Image (cartoon, rainbow, N blue to C red):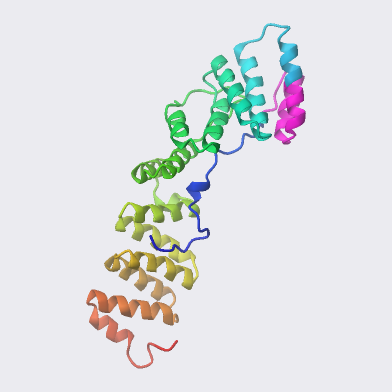
Amino acid sequence: MHSLATSSSKAFLTEFRIPDLSFAYSDWEDASVALIWKAMQEKDFRTALTLIREARHAAALVPQTNENSALLLAAQAAAEFATGSSDLAKRHAGKSLDLFPSQWMSHRILLSVLAGNHDFKGAYMQLARRRMRPVALWDEALTKVEIHTALGAWSWMLGDWDLVAKHLAKAYPGGIDTMPKEIQEDWFRLSLYRDRPEDAVAVASVLIAEQSIPLADELLQTIVQNGWTKQALPLYRSAYERSPESQLLRRRLVALCIREGALDEARRLTKPGALDLAA
């Protein structure tokens, strides 16, 4: 694939991460848990770990529900992960899930550990098996968009382009116009990898409207250099209509008209004064 004019040289999906847990819930009856959640919310992970160990020690003296024990382990897993102890994070998240398997919080920690270790297949399988269920008030479920974006990102890292397209379509069932710009750019890349000129044209028509002439031209040249000159022609026409003063776009359009046999159009564009070939 040739160079791609986007805001980043790297695909967004190659750098996608599961969003950090917010620990935003605050309606706690247990003051010690409230302090833990506050420390986690403020990203004071060392303090949180100290408070969690104290809370777990106190809880060991009094019978606890599985949910209460699980939420403390989940918080400990998150704090361990945030401080770089991935193995401990994985262990505590696993214990938490054993006690309260319907939660999302520990699943998210495990997914982050797997992806951080570049076990993208493991992360994909872990999340793909997860079923949407009612969640506890303190828990933090991933949204449908986040789920399918994550699955798409890990499919991207595995080079399964059709699976990436499937998940992005599920994340954004409203189509290209509903995608954030960075996802639109990846959809364009994906169209090249999948040899889908119709997809490339559809997303390029959206992207070029928001870019400078040089960047729009660079993106359209990617389509031309991929051999899709017939599809590139109407895009260059559209770009030129928006910026008729651009000599660059006019020259590109003339070249494509000649290549595609639209000779009358090429002649109109090259009438005296219409095209400064030296520009």
Residue pictured at 27% horizontal, 81% vertical: 265
Side of 219 where 34 appears, left or right = right
Q: Name the spot of residue 204 as percent of width and height, x first.
A: 39, 61
Q: Name the spot of residue 98 as percent of width and height, x first.
A: 54, 16
Residue pictured at 45% horizontal, 26% vertical: 130
Q: Main secondary structure of the magenta part?
A: helix
- The residue nearer to you, when weighing 159 against 277, is 159
Q: Name the spot of residue 74 as percent of width and height, x first.
A: 62, 24
Q: Does the magenta segment cover residue 61?
A: no
Side of 7 where 217 appears, left or right = left
Q: Would you identify the image quadrant in which residue 80 lies?
A: top right
Residue 275, above or below 151: below
Residue pictured at 40% horizontal, 46% vertical: 174
Side of 129 where 270 appears, left or right = left
Q: Does the magenta segment cover residue 27?
A: yes
Q: Residue furthest left?
A: 261
- The residue nearer to you, when weighing 45 against 276, is 45
**From which residue to which does the magenta span run?**
25-52
